[in-house]
Image (cartoon, rainbow, N blue to C red):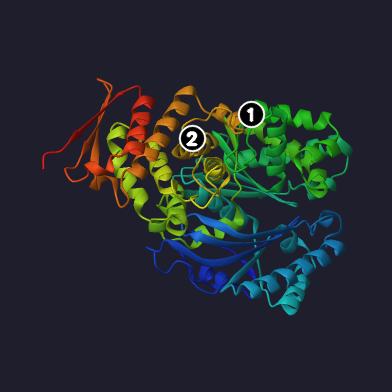
Amino acid sequence: MPKSDGTKRKSGKSAIGEDDVALFGRPLFEDPSARALERVGVVDVGSNSVRLVVFDGAARSPAYFYNEKVLAGLGQGLARTGRLNPEGRARALAALKRFAALAKGMRLPSLTCVATAAVREAEDGPEFRAEVERATGLKLWVIDGQEEARLSAQGVLLGWPEAEGLVCDIGGNSMELAEVSKGKVGRRVTSPLGPFRLQQVKGGKKGVADFIRAEVEKLAAAMGTQHDRIYLVGGSWRAFARLDMERRKYPMTVLHEYRMGPQSVLQTVHWIADNNLDTLRAKTGTSAARMELLPLASQVLRKLVLTFHPKEIDVSSYGIREGLLYEQMPERLRMRDPLIEACRHAERTSARMPGFGKKLFNFLMPLYQNATYEKLRLVRAACLLHDTTWRAHPDYRAEVCFDNATRANLGGLSHAERVFLGLALLHRYKNSRAGSRLEPLFSLLTERQIKEAEVLGKAMRFGAMFAVRSPDEAGSLLWRPRKKVLELILNADAEALFGEVVQARFKSLADSLGAKAEVSVAAG
């Protein structure tokens, strides 16, 4: 069971033990076949921020029912005083009182509270935990650096199952690295490279640079440098990525799965140093408290890139809070595709006819006989989502579809795949994309991908109208790509369904394929 001081340490085993259940007061996933998650709350008390997240939705791809953050600065000055920041402590306590009241109002069955570097390192950390419990009834579970690294890595795996490389989680007073490969978390290490800690380093800019270099060299010795990717977790990294987007004039502002090359990172580090922070803050909406820490965090990232030589640096919006959920997931649940699970949940809760998406996918399969797994999962996702925005006004439905796909909380989806999915759904409701305000985002796709998204959208546009219950009850498709012929074989009793509008949509699909449209009737 957990230690009496509220500190939780683990060996790194993935099995669910008594400690894991105790954190939530109950097991979250007693039924590994469950598709939906019962609403659950997590509080993360970090060195800089205190955050409440309430998860809901698909079990394998939980959505954010509620999300509130206070930049309390609990760990500011800790390296110098050895104690929690008095103002930060008062702000954190006030936030936790509010979070406890919110949880009660939401009737959450459980609210798990995890504290990291500031509370575990401060001499008045135990006193603060006791004060929180007296004032709110909330018990803070304090995790060590190794555990913090492991949970952050598991959070990355929740939304990025194929992640291979190093997870780098930066907080106010510490920075952790964890190795992820084949769905497992390997070596882990913690370091004093949080911006609050760096603020206390003596010797000016040279002293800070020397300190960062020495600590990163220790990390390299512990973790090795043969890692193609670094996955960034933490508010300072997200703020950096948002500025990288601004510098590059990147057309999308979704931070999750945003990808940077090493040269881009180094250019942005210099760009931040050369620009006024208040101006950059105004452009990106970054808070003043976060922007103040960014130059120091940027120096750490620069040294990481120059030392570990990754080919790609990727941003994850998932971390400790999501890692706590992944901790409890049975292996069977972890193996599910988070994208497909999120889309299934959306169809189940928002579509007019839940279950139709699977039938539509099967009807369209003749168009994708030689498609890769990666392509088929996008086709499946699109079919599941094709009718989830039907309540939107018809004049805006196509753009609402696109916005949902590109901005929704979907895991396991790159930015280019988001745009592909959004464009396919746009064409589900609209033949032409010309003149759309969304055109800048199309630049993330190749011309071929844009054409493939149009074909998928027009295929769904035809198949969804062809028959009410299931398109394969009315007919089937036969695609002969070499001859460029698309044939619709109508069932004998379904000729009446092939009306004027359906005919137009079938021809539009054939035209998008550069094919001749043919129609025949199956022998009765």
Looking at the rendered structure, the secondary structure element under dot 2 is helix
Mark 2 vs mark 1, CA separation in Å: 26 Å
Q: Front-most of 443 and 85?
A: 443
Which amino acid does the dot numbered 1 rest on? Pro
State which quarter of the image contains the N terminus: bottom right
- Locate residue 327, reporting x and y percent: 51, 60
Residue designated by label 2: 420
Q: Is residue 270 left or right of residue 187?
A: right
State which quarter of the image contains the C terminus: top left
Residue designated by label 1: 262
Relative to 282, is 106 above or below? Answer: below
Q: Earlier in the sequence, mark 2 or mark 1?
A: 1
- Locate residue 185, reporting x and y percent: 51, 50
Callout in the foreground (2, 1): 2
Which amino acid does the dot numbered 2 rest on? Phe
Residue 111 visible in image? yes
**Image point 36% across, 44% down: which residue?**
465
Looking at the rendered structure, the secondary structure element under dot 1 is helix
Q: Front-most of 86 and 98?
A: 98
Q: Residue furthest top?
A: 483
